Image: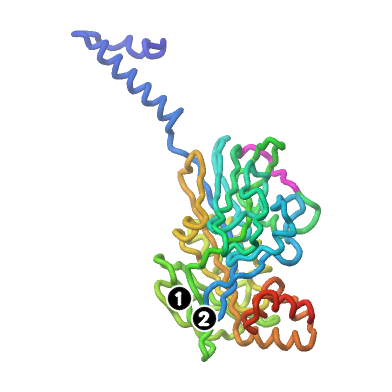
Amino acid sequence: MNSLLKRLLSGLPWKHGLFPLVAFGLSVLGFAGWLGTEGQSPSDLTVHEWGTFTAIAGKDGQAVEWTPLTGPTDLPGFVEHFSAVDFKLGLRGTIRMETPVMYFYSPRETAVSVRVAFSKGIITEWYPRADRVEPKDVIRNTSLGQSQTTGTIAWNDVSVSPSLPDEFPDDGRANRYYAARATASSPLRVRTPRGGQQEKFLFYRGVSASQLPLSATVNPDGRLLIKNLGPEEIPSVILFERRGEQVGYRAAGALTDESVLDSLALTSSVDSLCAELEGILVERGLYPDEAHAMVATWRGSWFEEGSRLLYIVPSGFVDKILPLSIDPAPAQVVRAFVGRLEIVTPATARAVATAMASHDEATLNKYGRFLEPILQIVGGNNPQSAQANRAGR
């Protein structure tokens, strides 16, 4: 028995053998308290994550296979990439998982390990440097739909350090990546055998051949039929369209079964939609500065030319195809993912066909990485034919 416990017991009346019983009881309580504070204390760690699942709907309304990694990278130069660049550019899947960022909050220095798996997919970019990214080798079949790959990434030694200064890498160029740092989350220091790196969050991207929890089909009358394909309610659905400087959107609320959405009047503003999206994300559990950081990161992409559905991905779907493991387990984990499903409407088909015929590069460039699958959907071409059409325009 230590001296402090003896002093506490010295003032008690010791009669009828009470001392041994009390001493034993206090010793047990002290041991249990030691376990509670040193071994099994409730975690005061909080983790919030946001990201985007991007896809494009085919004629049947479901996500088609496409090559989402074509075109120049939009990431800072210090971000880590899958080593086989040529392979990555030919990678085909249904979902482009874009910029999940994982924030950590703790009042004290805390060491954690993090592991994420991606069903039917691979991790293609990440930062800080990870301890393990698998698969390590090139998958010879670049169509993820014909493989059973489950990509993983692991950070084994992450220090959540609230006292660290906000000093993060910068490649000297303006980049939307940096908008994600504008939160009150704790800085992180990640240690690997190749050295340590500091960032405001854990970041990763990938491609998967998984199917979406919803479909969207353009009816002959021009209205959009959306169906919930999963067991969970889709918390929020927004239809958006942009033609030049004119934009329109309609928030359709939650989707439990199916719904038909009328075509849009292009009389809205991007600013009002951004405000509405931030409110929806806060309702899903993000802090206001996190919601603002997410919308600021994606404002230039979500609201570009064309038509699309923006929707909140059900939590069960996220956890199923993107299981997350954190040790020790946080007291709270919030994962808010926005789905982006491109819709090839008659207006989009006409715009692309006209631009192809007139070699209007400016218009075609507005559709960027989606141009190849749009050509495939409109013309019923295979991917090789669509790529050849684009190359010969």
Residue 80, percent across and down? 71, 50
Q: Which residues are magenta?
A: 159-169
**Tags 1 and 2 touching, CB below 8 Å:** yes
Q: Residues within 10 Å of mark 2 (few under 14, many from 20)?
A: many
The answer to whether 267 appears left or right of 388 in the picture is left
In the displayed structure, 241 sits above or below 23; it is below
Residue 84, percent across and down? 72, 54
The answer to whether 21 appears left or right of 238 in the picture is left
Magenta stretch prevailing secondary structure: loop
Whether residue 160 is visible here, answered yes or no, is: no
Q: Callout 2, which amino acid? A: Thr
Residue 129, percent across and down? 68, 44
The CA span between labels 1 and 2 is 9 Å
SS at circle 2 = strand
Q: Quadrant of residue 387?
A: bottom right
Image quarter hosting the C terminus: bottom right
Image quarter hosting the N terminus: top left
Residue sitting nearer the eye, 384 or 303: 384
Residue sitting nearer the eye, 178 or 218: 218
Mark number, residue 217: 2
Mark number, residue 174: none
In the displayed structure, 291 sits above or below 158; it is below
Residue sitting nearer the eye, 292 or 52: 52
Q: Callout 1, which amino acid? A: Lys
Q: Which residue is at 76% across, 88% downward?
A: 357
Q: Which residue is at 65% across, 67% downward?
A: 299
Q: Which residue is mark 1?
A: 227
Report the colour scheme.
rainbow
SS at circle 1 = strand
Q: Which residue is at 37% across, 21% downward?
A: 30
